[in-house]
Amino acid sequence: MINKVVFFNLFHYGDLHVSRGLVREVSKRCVAKGIKCEYFHNYSSEILGDLTDVQLVKTQHDFINITPSHVKGDVLFINTWYGGNQNIFNSYGLTFDTLYRSFKEAVKVLDIDFDNINPIDMFPSINYEKYQIENARLWLERNNTGKRRVFISNGLTLSGQFENFRFSNIINRLSRDYPDTQFLISNDETGVHEKDNIILTRDIIKKQGNDLNENSYLASNCDIIIGRFSGTYTFAMTKENYFDKPKHFVVFTIPSVDKYVWTYDFTPIPAAKIIRFSCSEENAVYTAINTQLN
């Protein structure tokens, strides 16, 4: 009999975000059964602070990145990374489908039947009320001018999702050519001009420490979301932005068989418009974005 579930993930922030809906659903059902849930990862509890049924622990386990989900004694360990089940990962890659299939297999010992749960309810979703969004909400209210808002995720990738080209001149050119558009920029970057329509999100959020969830809140209030397939762009991949209030995504990734859409067999086709480019030279990137802004 399983008396405890330990979720674990040894990768980055984005890897914690993309599986949060699955963790939320499984942990909710476990708690209803009287099964305690813990999460072992390398970051603070704040990053998944809206998962109220899970306790962050720092107990050292003999895990590596690709340790599969398994049962040990009366504890079920669930690897929440894409590679938690290598057979599934090798077939479906970096997708929600991989995570869904892996979780579905892992939780069979808990008598949790994924076939009776709407997959869309397990898509990433953030309860922003659990985060420090007060300043962002106030800024949005004060700047409710009807102008188009564009969120640009210009942080560097950490897992080789794409080349780390400079965004600074691209941002400057866009702000000049679209003076009536507000550009919200996720990361400091040398060379970005100080202009009224270029706003660093940190100056809106005004938070010490990690603000990825708060950036996601701002992105959810923008019309267009641009970036590499990493960081704040990943945190903008939510049920709300994909389906409920669909956004226009412009993503720069390696040309990998439509994996950038991220969800295929288990959810409806995203209502969001998701356009991929694989260019990295400044003029080409600018032209790609310009075609979408037009």
Image: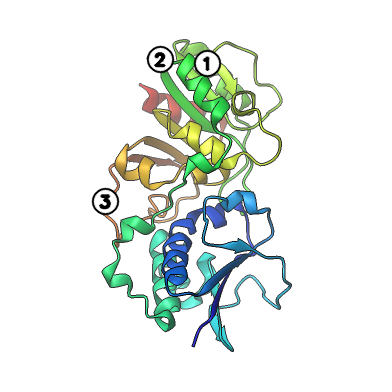
Residue drawn 65% across the image and 21% down it = 192
In whole angstroms, how far apart are the C-alphas of marks 1 and 2?
Answer: 13 Å
Check disc 1 and report the residue beneath it.
175
9 or 121, nearer to the observer: 121
Residue drawn 41% across the image and 68% down it = 29
> How far across and down, in percent of the image, does residue 155 sit?
62, 38
Q: Secondary structure at mark 1?
A: helix
Residue type marked 1? Ser
- Name above or below for residue 234 compared with residue 202: below
Q: Is residue 269 visible?
A: yes
Residue 21, quarter of picture: bottom left
Check disc 2 and report the residue beneath it.
147
User: In which quadrant of the rendered image does the C terminus lie?
Assistant: top left
In whole angstroms, how far apart are the C-alphas of marks 1 and 3?
Answer: 32 Å
> How far across and down, in percent of the image, does residue 229 sit?
51, 46
Check disc 3 and report the residue beneath it.
269
Residue type marked 2? Lys
